[in-house]
Structures are given as structure tokens and as C-alpha cells.
Amino acid sequence: METAGPRTRAAARLGAHATREEQRKRRPVRRWQRRRIEEEQEEAVFREVVSFTRDPLPARYYDKDTTKPVSFYLPSLEELLAWTPDAEASFNVALEPLKCRQPPLSSQRPRTLLCHDMMGGYLDDKFIQGSAAQNPYCFYHWQCIDIFVYFSHHLVTIPPVGWTNAAHRHGVCVLGTFIAEWKEGGRLCEAFLAGDERSYQAVADQLVLIAQFFRFDGWLINIESSLSPAAVGNVPPFLRYLSTQLCRQVPGGLVLWYDSVVSSGQVKWQNELNEQNRIFFDSCHGFFTNYNWREEHLDRMVAQAGERRADVYVGVDVFARGNVVGGQFDTHKSLELIRKHGFSAALFAPGWVYECLEKRDFFQNQDKFWGLLGRYLPPHSICSLPFVTSFCLGMGTRRVCYGQEEAVGPWYHPSAQEIQPLFAEHRPEGDGQGWVKTHCCLEDAWNGGSSLLIRGVIPPEVGHVAVRLFSLHVPVPPKIFLSMVYKLEGPSDVGVALELTTGDAGSCHVGGISTLSAEASSRHSPRPLRVPPTKLARWVGHCGQQLSGGWVQRCYEVNLRGCVLQDLWVSFSRPPGSREQEAFVCRLGELQVVDANSLLSPLPRVQAVSVSRVRWQRAAPEEEEEEGEEEEEERPARLRLSCALHWSYPLSHVRCFRIHCCRATGSPAEGPPGLEKPALLGLAFVNQYRVVDLAVAAAGPGTDGRVEFLVEPVSREGFLVPKAEWGRAALLYSGPHT
């Protein structure tokens, strides 16, 4: 998509109108009554007469109680075959493409698959624009896994988009689930597998279309129903066709088969790959074993799998149901045997730590569980710039934007989760007492809902301790800009520094760097800038300064030639002259590594903001009472406004959109209203947003009510965009005709 360039106002209006017309043509036809569109000061203005009749919303795509957009599943074969992409489904399309990583998933290094099965699925994670959930489940050990499967017992489980965005941001591929169970599942399978190839190809084509449209990466196929000879005979060609077509449409697509049906058509869990189920393994990308295996099963599978050992995912039920080697906090016992034999691992339902243990101890238990597995889970490396994270978990007890508190109250938005570090404890070599530990921190944030808490001790015998936060493998451009935002707790003179490790891509030359030591010549400490580079000043004008909330920003500019950036570390050094043991508590609010030249490129502008699907409700009496202490005759009546916003913006340039509103202030009796300060409504990760139950004042007799919507893009590099580049639309509304 072309970026916006200088145009006359008339040309801009014409272009914006054409863009909106194109968007409306792509969306289903709707009734647009009593509405006209104007352009006023480069802002789209929409007019509406308040009406309390409802334009029904498609039940599949919107929550019936709140009308918020939701992720969905397909419960029947008929619905699968009838599904087609439409504008309503676009809310569920992932913004984040699958990030490149090292080693690639296609390598033969044993992998780790996480199969997320929690209480039937589609819980608070189904709300695409987030929710006010308190104490939701949150996964953040992404660098330890390679594949994420969203599992439920519905026929076609489409992963909620928040999981896809979070996983892709970390280089983790995402699979949905196709499951058929018991007698009903058997009847369903006979319907598309027992006939000719057109039947199973139609099902496969729909599964490919769904993965391609929603931008996830493939399917786990789980048939736990007995099949007739005709039906089971068509399973291998079905898997081959699905695998081939998926890889044509979804680069790196995966199809995995679960150990259930054997070649005779019976349901017989084998707990291993063997001659009874090998035909299915040979027809797709991988095999997910049942959970009740012993070491002798692994011994036999070594010969069966041959060179494809990494394509065998040995199942581990974290709930430890049945006759298993180890689950719960003994899951590492299973992992030890799996890795000993060179297989991949499939961890089923690690949400056990959330479902079965105390919610108040969730983060402690989550870190304990994954910490016990750490030695068996080699991390993968992120391979692209920009690399930016505020350590936000996609949840919190308040919302913060660059040190400024915007809202107080619980929130949960998985798409808003940012890149998470390697959570670990680091101890220096030798017999010293130094250590560094990292934890999630919901008590304070620089941007989003959380930060990274780093605690540690510098022992008397060493000058500093350091912790590796990220494993990278990034061929870097000639000049990179780095930034770190942090705060130390309490009075502390401990030094905080960013360090990076480089690897040679041919011959690596580094400038703007102090080498730490001859023994560790590839690990460097950049020299912080006292003032930002002139060309970058509009983005990074606070380098070396104290920021709001006690945060400090350190900026660095590094010249590189022929280098690969491998790791990011944070180092803590004792104060000058100190010989004592030094304890410290540091909160890390943001890390940025960006191509300095990318910050010089012009920014696109949000265009063609439109308002549609307008719905009105009268405020409930109790809501009226909560609005203020004014006398009843002075307080304007209240309404609840819901509507859809659409706009145009190249998604490859954006991390997310921040949606704001400005409502009219004052009473209609006092004359033309003003507008309040912008209030954050929420975040969007597509070019649309649904406003739900926004409280507005009713229009007075002969006057218009007004609410303005602002669409603020947040750049990929993590910087706020000037207001001149925001998109705007205003809704003027008048009272219902009598």
C-alpha cells in the first residue's frame, strides 16, 4: 500500500472517499439510514439520528452479551464447508507474521510443542479487543517452545488471534485443531472420508483457507473415532493433500497427526510410532504420541523414526493422568527421557499450574514449572529488527503509556503481550555468592501493564554481575540505535549497563563499543550517549534523562560492519570505591534495538477513518445516578453508543493502534459543546475497532451531540507518532424524530 504524500485538500477528500467506497464494497451490504458523510478540516464527519432499533450482528463473530468481537470455532462439518471469509471475520486476522528464527523449525534439532487445553477453551482469550479479566492465565516462556497448539473439543478450533500474535512475535508457529470424537465424530468422518477424493479435498481446502485467512500456521489432526475400511483408507491421501496444499498457501505450514486411530480403523492408542500408525506419520509433517509411554516405547521408536526423530512429538500430560513417567512438577522426568532419545516433546495442558494450584501463586508456580524444564528446552533466537519490548505481559492492573498512567483496573489483551525474555537465575562461575534473577512485575510499568523485575547480589569478590535476557541471531545493519529504560529501587548507586554479544559474519568490526575483556572479546558494552543523534532527536529526545515515574533512559549508537548480534545482557556493577556486598532491585521498562536509518523514513498517515454499525442504548437508571452530583434538570440524559471504526494503514509499519475518543463537554442548554481530552478506549491490531457501550450525553433539542474518534498508530520501532499522522472521524448525532 502506498504511503500518503502531499496532496491538495480536494484531492485528499476524493481519495479518502474512494478508499471508503472500496472498503464498503468489500464489506457486506448494510442499511445506512439517516446518515451522510462530510469532510471538515481533514476529518471525516458522520451524521446519525439516534434510533433504538437494532441492526443485528452476526452471532458467530460477536459476544451475545457485550457485542464485543470474539474469536470463534466451527462446531460442524456443514459450517466448516460453508465458511467463507468476510469483513466481520477480519477482527480475528493476526497482525504479526511469523518472525524468522534460528534454528529454523525445519532443522532437525528436537522441538518443544505446547498444546494449550484449558477448561474447554475460548475463555477470556476469546475477546479480540481484550477484557477486564482479573487473574487470567498468561503464558510467557515463549523462547523455550517452538510450536503452540490451541486445543478444544470443537470440530474446528481456530486459535484466538491474541495467541497467534503473541506466538508469532516470538517466532513460535501456531496450530489449530481438527478433532472428531466418539460416535458423532465417526459419523462425521464417514461423511467426508468414505467417499471419493472430492469430499476430503473439500474439507482440506477449507482448513487451508482458514489458516491462510487468519494467518496461523497449520493443524493438529485428532481423529478419535473408529473408521470404516473405506474411510481409514482415505486418511493418508487426506493428510498428504492437506499438507501439500497448506505449504503452498502458508509458508512453513505444519500438519501433525495424533496417535489414536491405527491402520485398521480402530481407535487404539499406541503410545509410540510403530507399524500400525506409521502410514499416517509418512503422510504429514509430524506425529504426536499418546501419553502413557515407557522408556521401552522410546527405544523402539528410534529405529521407526530414523532421520525424522525430530518429527515425533512424544506426548507428556502435565496433569499426570494415567500411567505416565512424570507430570506436574515432575514433568522434567519425562523430558529427560525424551531428549535422551533425541525426540521432540509435546507438553499437553501445562496450564495445570493455573487450573489446579492457587491463583495468587500463579507466577511463582509458572516460573517453577518452566524452570525445572529449562535444561531440556534450548531457546531459539529472534532474527529480525526492529527488536522492541516493554516486557508487557498483555495484562495488568492498570495501563501505562511511557510512564504516564492512563487507566486503573484489571485488563487482559493477549495481542498486547510483547517479546518476553529468558526467565532464569544466573550465578557467576566460581564459589562466589553473586546471583541475578528475573521475574514478571505487575506492580510497575513503563509502557503497558508490566515490567521486568531484576533482583540480584554483587559479591565482594567481583565488580559486576550480568544476566542474559535475549538470545538473538540478527545480521545487523551498519548503524543501530539501542535504548534501555530502567529504574533502581530505593537509594542505590549500582551501575546499570546494556551489553551485547556479537558473532562474526565473515569479519566483524564494531565501533562505539568498549570491549569488556580479552577473554570475552565478542561481548561488548556500548558507551551511552549524553544527547541523542541530531537526526533522531524527534524520536529519542530524552536520552540520559530522568523520566516520569523515576524511570531513566540510556541511549546508544553502535556502528557495525559484517556482524551478527547474538545476545542482549544487562549488567550491574558495584559503586566506585565499594568493597561490600551490594544487593539491588531494578525494573526494566523497555529495550529497543533498531536500524538507525529506518527512523529517518517518512511515516504513513492513517486515512479514511469511517464510522458504521452504529447502535444506541438508553443508559440504565443506575448509570444515570453514577454520572455526577448535578441537579437532575441540569444533568443531560445519557446514552450508550456502540459502533465500528474502519481505517486504512499499511500494517507492516505498525505494532498496534491506540484508539481514543473525545466526548462533548458541558450541557446542551449551555450552547455548543466543547470536547474533553482524548481518552484511551483500547488497542487494535487490525484496521478496525469496535466501540462498545461508550457513555455519551444525549443531544439536546435543536442541537447535535458530538463524539470524535482518534486512531493513533504505534510504529514498529516503538515510538509514538505525531498527532498529524493520526486518523480522525467525528460522529454528530441528534435526538430521535418524534
Image: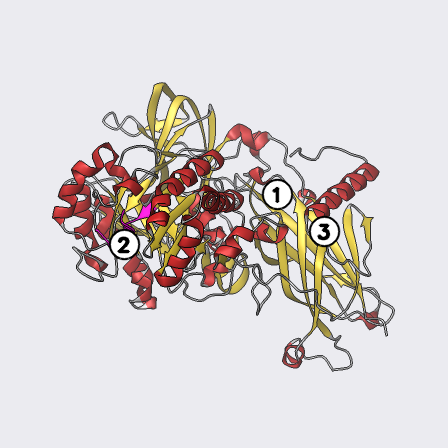
Image height of 298 relative to 414, above or below: above
Q: Position of residue 654 (x, y in %)?
A: 56, 41
Observer-side mark, 2 or 3, equals 2
**Residue 534 found in image quarter:** top right
Q: Which residue is mark 3?
A: 610
In front of the other: 494 or 415 = 415
Question: Which SS type dominates the magenta stretch?
Answer: loop
For marks 2 and 3, the one nearer the N-term is 2
Report the side of 441 relative to 216 (left or right).
left
Number of numbered discs present? 3
Any magenta on residue 269?
A: yes
- Where residue 629 sits, quadrant-wise, is bottom right
Q: Which residues are magenta?
A: 257-270
Reading the image, the residue beneath label 1 is 721
The amino acid type of the residue labelled 2 equals Gln
In the rendered structure, which amino acid carries the disc numbered 1? Val
The mark found on residue 266 in the picture is 2
**Nearest the eye: 127 or 655:** 127
